[in-house]
Amino acid sequence: MCGIVGFVGDRQAAPILLDGLRRLEYRGYDSSGIAVCGDGALRVKKARGRLQVLSDLTRAGADLPGTLGIGHTRWATHGEPNDINAHPHVSQSGRIAVVHNGIIENYMILKEQLLRKGYTFRSETDTEVVAQLLDYYYDQCNDFFEAVMCTLNAIEGAYALGIVCADYPDRMYAARKDAPLLLGFGEGSNYLASDVTALIRYTRDIVYMDDGELAILSAGGIRIYDRQMRPVEKEHHHIDWEVDAAEKGGYAHFMLKEIMEQPRAIREATAARIQSGRVVLSDLTMTAEEIRSIGKIYIIACGSSYHVGMVGKYNLERMLRRSVEVCLASEFRYSDPIVGEGDLVIVISQSGETLDTMAALREAKKRGARILSIVNVVGSSIARESDDVLYTWAGPEIAVATTKAYSTQMAVLNLLGLYFGDIMGTVDYETYTAMIRGIQNLPTQMEEILLQKDAIHELARECASHEDVFFIGRNLDYALSLEGSLKLKEISYIHSEAYASGELKHGTISLIEDGTLVIALGTYEPLFDKAMSNVVEVQARGAHVLALTTEKHAADMAARVPMVIAIPETEQMLLPQLGVVPLQLLSYYIALERGCDIDKPRNLAKSVTVE
Ligand code: F6R
């Protein structure tokens, strides 16, 4: 999704803006641009394509003097990706420049009004309306602060805005509604960004803006106002990520680095939450009484986070003996959901900014449900609007395809199941202790699996030329197959589908023909024999099978199947935690063999902040 950076301070702005934008590249974009105020002028440079084009165009920023500026990476929504539609957008008078994330819903009406007043438009974007409207109000009242307020009152929809005006080369304006925006406090310099990764090289002192707030940034400080234009004091957050957490650190891709980081991420997410063999969730404010009286449980999420929810359904139902409904956020929000007081809604999101997930959260909250979110990005919108947050502590995830966030979300959900199950009295002692032991062993077992990466690369070479793949599995293996299939399709562009094995014969098996690649998951011990029967069934129709199973069953599987990956034994409910690692590696190496842009797959964005 689009990214915003802003700088005002004691140094040349352009190189800092370009560096910030480079750190936002991972979010996905198709064009970029910067606007800098200096020497009494507002200079704007924009370019379609990679950021390097913009950097070359400005000689790495050297051509743009000035210590105040805004930058943007655009992911096209209104109008095709080109130089004109790229941000910043400049008003007709050339005085005002705007960068924007989100969608101005009433832009057509505003545009018509401005056209009637003689304004002309260059781009097809909704954002240009904001620049022209600012110009219009500024002309009317001759007070830029008032012009900004009038503009914010006139626009509807979602926005994170960075605004500069050539008449005020010492300050920049920032406004937020339903799109993330944060302020960075430095020494003699201050910053604006849509994502903390753009800023950690410069400052770790961060304030997250809330909806309806307006900020004015100058080199000497930042003033923040609420909807009624009253000054507000905000909580400062210290970001303790290492700078190199957002660097590749010698790996060819962020995705591989993040796959390899999973043992450490799981340790971070779980170690402090297990004390003397018991789960301690000190970050949870729910009382034992509130936990015992939970009615229905919903899990709401999108994409891979939804797949974690699918695993969670099997595990929470087993540990809590309560029915758990897993919902796609984009469906839940429009489904007139039967959710209310006494119900618990578990919201899962790596970014904490996914628009559909956010909207579903608000819908559930409005209806009286309690919201507990599992989130990676500290201080994100979902985290802030939830009654309780359990952070996954995975560190920054840069590759578009999630890996370590998925794993840590699952680990936290398992801990939550154990914690609730203990209080509800629904999880027996043997299962509880086996799960604790299993969770503590996960990092070491994941390290063992990661040692197989060269062997998995070999298998990937054999699979890379297929154009259709089916992932099949039952129970937890089915939930895991959904993630395996998504991982493969999003980064390798191979058509891939996941099916509950039992469903095959209800239609899909007609697609299996000579040489079709089937990735058969057979890690779930209670249903191993059935997994094996499904392997035989697809082989009989000519399928080429790659199987994922546990070490215990590896030999049986290898007797039938040419390609087998084995994971160590663990408690049943934890098998997807281990099983996902080879599936991630397999997708990664297949995409590598096909020469794909692994960290930034086509058409995808890291954080989906539009509907
Ligand atoms: C796939 C992937 C996406 C996200 C989805 C939700 O690899 O990363 O499917 O899981 O867009 O994002 P979050 O978890 O940030 O709400």
Image (tube, helix red, strand yellow):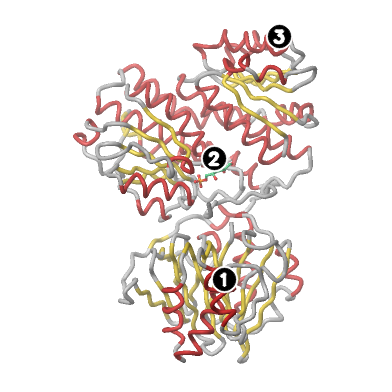
**For residue 396, which numbered disc appears in the image?**
none
Tell me which amino acid carries mark 3.
Answer: Arg
Q: Residue at x 31, y 30 (%)?
A: 278
Viewer-nearest residue: 414 or 163: 163
Whether disc 2's CB lies below 8 Å from ligand 1 is answered yes
Residue marked by disc 1? 99
Query: Which badge, 2 or 3, is on the more N-terminal residue?
Result: 2
Looking at the rendering, the quadrant in which ligand 1 lies is top right
Residue marked by disc 2? 303
Q: Is residue 112 above or below residue 540?
A: below
Q: Is residue 205 above or below residue 304?
A: below
Q: Is residue 550 visible?
A: no
Is there CB contact under 8 Å for labels 2 and 1? no
Viewer-nearest residue: 12 or 533: 533
Q: Mark 2 to mark 1: distance in Å?
A: 28 Å
Residue marked by disc 3? 560
Element carrying mark 2 = helix
Q: Residue at x 62, y 59 (%)?
A: 77
Q: Mark 2 to mark 3: distance in Å?
A: 33 Å
